Image: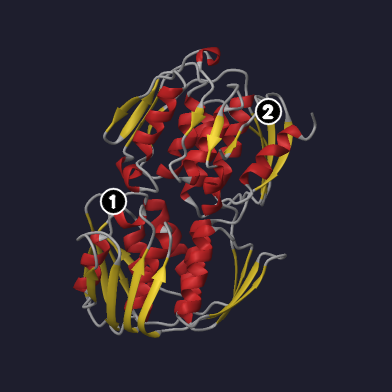
Amino acid sequence: MNYFQPKPSTNFNVTVDIPGSKSITNRALILSALSGKNVTLRNILLSDDTKYMIEALKALNNDIELDLQNKTLKIKGNKNPKFENLEIYIGNAGTAMRFLSSYLATGTGSAVLYGNARMNVRPIKDLVDSLTQLGVKVEYLNEVGFPPIRITANGVSAKTVEIDCSKSSQYISSILMASPNFKSPIEIKTIGRVVSKPYINMTLKMMKDFGIQFLEKDNSIYIQPQEYSPSEYLIEGDMSSASYFLAMALISNSTVRLNNFFKNSIQGDSQFLNVLTKIGLKILSFNETNITVQGVENYNGIELSMNDIPDVAQTLAAVALFAETPTKVWDVENMRIKETDRISALKNEILKLNGNFEEFQDGFLITPKPFTEYEGEFLETYDDHRMAMSLTLIGLRVPNIKILDPNCVSKTFPNFFEEFNKIYLGE
């Protein structure tokens, strides 16, 4: 049986290195491909999700050269790609599935995008509906509304499109990034309540960094056909990955320095630092690319909407178990269509520990107990990297926690457990 067993530990002092951002790496790869130019990407993340994207772009005749030691990637983009009867496997990489769909739409030919069993039950209908509005032919090869899909493209000439963003912000990010390569000016209009809006802002900021101009007005974004003009791009440290080590400091009343933590981050999950400081985390120093934080002996829970930052809700759940008062989270229904149904999965595992967990359709309530009442257990990870990393934090206070199938962290943070184990090196 494959598992990782964290040992309880408190009051330590450790320095950890945060990997490059998955969200930024995959956006930078697509933007570079769309540019048709030579681009150097620095501080890239090499994880399962980004490797699937890289292999897909190679299959679409983008020239890619990797320098693993220096975490650098050089790419010569293939603008408006041509392809025929291509099949592209992307595992459970949601960004790859969604971003590649619109990249293919700017090209000519026919290609199938497919993933693993979990990917094939993650909805994609809202994006497909928008691509169909754009004149792209998209066929469902199994169940309507879900991958695998076949895309038959001959470029995009449409002048307007509506996108339902109530399930995922990646749908509009996908079309936004491809839109400068459309044949006509386009109005991209959002309908429905937008979830994870900071990710859309990240996309627009990166497009601007890559030389694109656009106009935002009301619920629409207007983009003219134009050229991407990048040459080099530095990828920030991943704020979702950083969340586990910020939480580590608070849970264990320890001092943690995080390298590759960008002070002026464009990532929405950087807001998680503010959430933790509200309940007690102390910032000892904060420079351009690193931060040092310190936990406290006791802290209270919190009640908040995490609509903008759903990917760190599991991290907050681990923090909530050791608070003095309850923690309530809402506005995160899209957690249910991630790598697993994350709300139900959290409930299953926290109840195993003898914890209190009340499930809502769009969130949860955790009422903490004295940590001595929690019981060590084998905890399932559901092939979900964020389940594995957040549940590991519980082992800082509760003995005999065993994290099953820990290798799923390779999706975004392959060396997570190496960084986590640094806390034991001084023992």
* Residue 286 visible at all: no
In the picture, residue 325 is in which quadrant? Answer: top left
Q: For residue 177, which quarter of the picture?
A: bottom left
Q: CA distance from mark 1 to mark 2?
A: 37 Å
Please state the total of marks drawn on the protein image. Answer: 2
Q: Is residue 18 left or right of residue 353?
A: right
Please tell me whether mark 2 sits on a helix, a strand or a loop: loop
Depicted 138 relative to depicted 295: above or below: below
Instruction: List the single residue furthest toward the right.
Output: 426
Question: Which residue position is annotated with label 2?
Answer: 254
Coloration of the structure image: secondary structure
Identify which amino acid the numbered label 1 is placed on: Lys
Q: Which residue is mark 1?
A: 167
Q: Badge 1: how crowded within 10 Å, few (<14), some, or many (20+)? A: many
Give the side of residue 315 with respect to residue 157, left or right. right
Earlier residue among tags 1 and 2: 1
